[in-house]
Every structure is written in C-alpha cells, then in structure tokens.
Image (tube, helix red, strand yellow):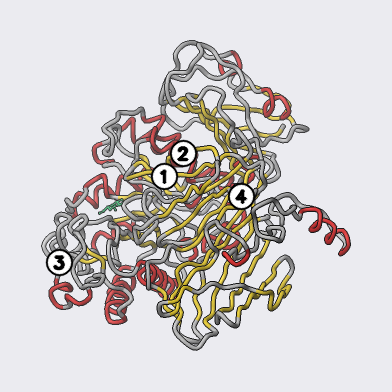
Amino acid sequence: MHWGGDLGTLSESQLARFVAAQTVAVPPSSIGDPAVLSLVPVASEGWSGTPGLTGHRGNRTVEPSFSLADLAFTEENRIAVTLADSAAGLEVRIELSLSTEGLLEARSSVTNTGVDRFILGRLGITLPIAPRAREVLDVTGRWPFERRPQRRELAHGSWSRQTRHGRNGHDSPELLAAGTLGFGFRAGEVWAVHLAYSGDHDVYAESHPTGHAVLGAAELLAPGEVQLDPGESYSSPQVLAAWSAGGLDGVSERFHAWTRRRSRTRHRRAGDRPVILNTWEAVYFDHDEEQLSQLASIAASVGVERFVLDDGWMIGRTDDSRALGDWIVDPVRWPNGLAPLVDHVRALGMDFGLWVEPEMVSLDSDVARAHPEWVLTGWPERLPLAWRNQFALDLDNPAAFDAVLAQLCVLVDEYEIAYLKWDQNRDLLGGSAHRQTLATWRLMAELNARYPALEIESCSSGGGRTDLGVLQFTDRVWPSDSNDPLERQRIQRYSSIVLPPEVIGSHLGAAGAHTTGRETDLGFRLATAFFCSAGVEWDLTKASDEELASVRTWIAAYKEHRFLLHSGVTVRADPVDPALELHGVVAADRSEAIFAAVCLEAPRDAVTTGLVFPGLDPGMEYRVEPIDLGAPVRYFHAKPQWLLDGGVTLPGRILSEIGIAWPPLQPQQALVLRAVRV
Ligand code: DGJ
C-alpha cells in the first residue's frame, strides 16, 4: 500500500480507512476485483509484471495463489509474513524490518511443502513506489570506469538491470533509484534499492498501465540452479531499500548509518582506518626485496601505517599467466620468504597486508595439475573462456575449499597478517554463480571466525564486488583500479550513495594515471583520496623530496580529520554548472564539517557565486577556512576576497542556502575547506 514517509500512528479504524481509500476502482476489460499489489505479486492476482516467484515441478509451471498463513511482529519494527499455497506446495516467508535509521531490510524464503521436487525460477522482493516517481537513476560502468550514472524516464515497461558475471561486475547496479522529476542529491523524493549480494543480480524499476509502479530486486538464478526437494528452502539475499524526501543525500544517510552499525565495519572505531601503501602500481609483478624494503621505509617516513604487498609474491608469479592457486612464496625472488620484508615493515611501526585471490586458479599451477577437477566448469563439463589467463576454483567442492582455507591460514599465521586484499579477477562464464558466491562468502566467514582481528578488502579487478553483502565479511572495498582523480571524483560520488566513505579505498597514484594516461596535479590527487579510506599506490622511491613533504602533510591532515571524515554525514551540492561540484562530510552534531570544492572542467562562467555548503546548521555561525594538504591549488585568476582573507565567518543559513563566491579553480583542481562552529 505504501512505502514512503512516516504516516504517524494510525488507529485500527484509520488504517482500515486508509487501505480502503487506496483501493482502486475496477477499470473496463480487466480482472473483476480491484488490483492490489502484493509482496510476492503473481499472475493469479492479476499481476502481469515481473513475478515475485516463479518455478516448476516436472514439466508443469507452478502457478501459486498465496493466502496469508501468518503475520508475526517478531520485534519492534520487524514483521514476518507467511504466505502459503498448499495445492502448489509452497510456503513463502517474507521478513521486513525498518531499522532505526529508516532503512528497510527485506528478505524472503520459499519452502517446498509439496511432495516432489520444485525448481525455483526466481524469488524477489517487490516494493511499491508512488506514481510521482517518474525518473530512474542507476549506475553502470566498465573496468576501470565504474559507477557511471544513467538516468531515464520511468515509462511503461521495465528498466531491468540483470547481471550475469558470477560476481557483481563493473556495471553492477549497486544503486537503483526512482524519484520525482529532476531529483538530485539534495532535492526530490527518492526510493532506492540495493541488493546486498555478490552474485548475479536482477534489479528493476517497473511501471504498468494498470497504475502500478514498483522497484524490485532478486538474485538472478540460472535455470535449474536451485532445486528444492520436499522440505527444502531457498533464502533470497537481503534487499535494502531507502526512501528519502531530501534527495539522494537522504538515501545515503540511511545506508551509511545502517552500515556503520550493522556490517563488519562496526568492529572498528571511526577514525582508526590506517593509511595504506599498496605496491601494485609501484612495482606490479616486479618484486625485489631490497626495493620493496626501501619503499616501506619511505612509506613509514611519510606516515603510512599499513604496507600491503600486492600480486606477484607467489611461486613463479612473474606475470598474470601462472601460479594462482599456489599460495606459496616464490623461492626465487623471495629466497628468505616474506619474513625479512614483514619484519622490516613491522619494525617501522606499520602492519602488514597481503594480496590473495582465493577463488582463482591458473592452469599453470601445481594445484591445477594435481586437481584438474577443482577447476570450475559448467555443464557439459568444459572450460569456460580464459579471462586474464585464469579460471575459477570450484569452492563448492569441499576439498578445494579446505585446501584454499588451509593455505590462507598458513600465511596469516606465519606472517601475522593484519589485512588481506582479496581479489577476484574474472567473470565466471560457467558453473553455478549461486553456489560459488555462497561458497566464497563461507570462506570469508570462516576466516572472520578464525581471525577476528584480520581485516579483508574486497577487490574484484577494481570495483567488481562492492556490495553491502560482502561487507558483512570484509572491511573495505576497492571501488576501481583507476587512481586517476578525475575518474575517481565520479566513482566516489556514486559509490558513496550506498557505501560510507570510510569503506571505500582511495589511493594517491602517480602524476600520470596508469589507467588513463591523464596527467594531474598532486594537489588534485591528494584532495580526491582524502575523503575515503586513504592510501598511496605510487612508487615513492621515485618521488621528489618536495612531493614526499606534500604526502607527509596530507597524511598528517588526514589523521587529524579522519574521525570526522569517517563518522559524519555525507553531503553533496546539486551542481548548477556541471563543471563545479561540492561534496563534504558534516559532523553529526553539525559543529564541524569538511568540504571539497572541485572543478572538473572549464566552468561555464568567468566568476561564479553560489558555493553552498549543505548540511550546516542554519542557526549556527561557522568559520570556513582552507585545509592545507601540502600541495598548491591552481586558479584561473585572483582569488575572491574571502579566500585572500584566509577564510570567512558567516551564519550556517547563508553558507548552506545562498553560498559564497566560488574560488576560480582551474580544471582538475580541488580546494578542501573546513567549517567550524564559532
Ligand atoms: C586487480 C586489482 O584490482 C589490482 O588492484 C591488483 O591487485 C591486480 N588485480 C593484481 O593482479
């Protein structure tokens, strides 16, 4: 009947009248009863949209017609609805819970109560949206250009984002939102769904001539992938949904608060995310103990707190054609094992992280030679196309699962690893995505249980696996292999609608971005990485003393402000000129905030006013001043007076609603500002 604003407390009779008043008339040439949208809409109710459940038994399509079997208020704000159709032999249980942050958690399960096998086609969560939701926004992308927004009118039909990667994929519809015309970050009414799942997705917005419009989400199952014998059940992944009257920022507020409280990140205190040095773009596969030790020394000297040895450390792994699955240190390039490097890293006061790709295998590996049956195939049994020269290991095979787990445990124990960068670099293209995804989650859960302090980063060729499901088991995601700050501005802007900034890794790369070839100023790169879980992915042995001094200043500023950056409310202004974006983080009590004014390309106008700082308290007064990140910011011409004066003191109402003069930033420049209540 309603998903949206709080209706207040309704009496039984008010509720009955509300429901009656929502009930539509019967139009000509239609079913004889008023159409009512159910939680599991199916054809027997007159629903011709995407069904909530499909399946078959033998050669018969099952056409369920559910009745309410039970409705239980299990906890405050949590209900469990049981629907049953004994003739069809199905029972569906839907749990809906509205978290204190106003995030709707939905999950459903189906049990085969019949006498023969039921083959499930789909089981989804369908949520109603108001007729005024006329536009759809979702994200797509490719390597390394993840989270590109796309928008369209919600016309009759279905805007369906189905993914078949066996992982989320770079085009993952991590966010699918419908809203009132022109909805933005700060304005408009928005309904948004996220499937907290690391496998194949089916996420959609649908509008029908019947007058119904819905958002839906389900695991995309392959035919025959889930077969339920009598008494067996299937549980859907969790669907998370947020409504906001205040644009996408309102959606983020609910998702971020929920994630901070519910996922594995709750084990961490805000502000204790270590600064990382990751070796990938510094040395790639070219591992040399002496050079990496030198890199570690320089990293420690500028303030890095965690040294992560990326791909290339395993036996024979001098390129990407071999050794996946052999989680053994290369005796040629690491004759003394990793211990000398690890000891050095620890002596410098940093902790140690290691790259692994536990779900994968190279055909050129001892494990594939010994156990070719562990390489994941579909049916008929044949190898899928190679992808980056590699194949998936069948983790649903208990022997393969145990072997990988054992190897990972040896490494974690031997080197007292604080952090695993867990990579996954291919689409499956064969085998059961459902079983492989659940087996991967089980492997992560097993490591969580054995090593509660071990942190894990979820990486999948960059941003191929960044959902809130995997964050039950992991602490950080790598949203893209792009360290190009211009691309990163967009990637972080759209990743952070669902994910809080502290779980999004962001690294300072070299001046020439390895993925795009674009040259950018150090200041822009520093300002971009500042707002997430910051790190460095640059060969600092080649950086000048001046550059190292900048990095040192930046890291010191990051450490000073990371509590606020990682606990505050994310805000973004809706740009008037698409070249000029402002985003920031405001403390929960609104006493303090940090913003970045960003110029992406040449602005439309020579001088611009309206640099607004959303989220500030209109009733408070603030001092706004630049934060020195250690590198210069370039301007087209003279700065406005407030910047020449070193800052400005104004009421929050003026700062957040009218704004001040934009600094005349050149393209690909950013100015980071701090607002403090006076
Ligand atoms: C893909 C990841 O996204 C990179 O960061 C790096 O770890 C490489 N894989 C290593 O092979």
How far apart are the two marked residues, 1 and 3, measured between alpha carbons? 32 Å
User: Do labels 1 and 2 touch, CB within 8 Å?
Assistant: yes
**Disc 3 secondary structure class:** loop
Of labels 2 and 3, earlier in sequence is 2
Label 1 CA crowd tier, 10 Å (few <14, some 14–19, many 20+)? some
How far apart are the two marked residues, 1 and 2, measured between alpha carbons? 7 Å
Which of 524 and 582 lies nearest the eye of the viewer? Answer: 582
**Percent of width and height locating residue 565:** 55, 44
Which residue is disc 4 drawn over?
213
**Which callout, 3 or 4, points to the residue nearer the camera?**
4
Which residue is disc 2 drawn over?
150
Q: Quadrant of residue 42?
A: bottom right
Name the residue: 49% across, 42% down. Answer: 494
User: Do labels 1 and 4 touch, CB within 8 Å?
Assistant: no
Which residue is disc 1 drawn over?
140
Q: Is mark 3 within 8 Å of ligand 1?
A: no
Which residue is disc 3 drawn over?
363
Q: Quadrant of the N terminus?
A: bottom right
**Which callout, 2 or 4, points to the residue nearer the camera?**
4
Q: Residue furthest bottom?
A: 115
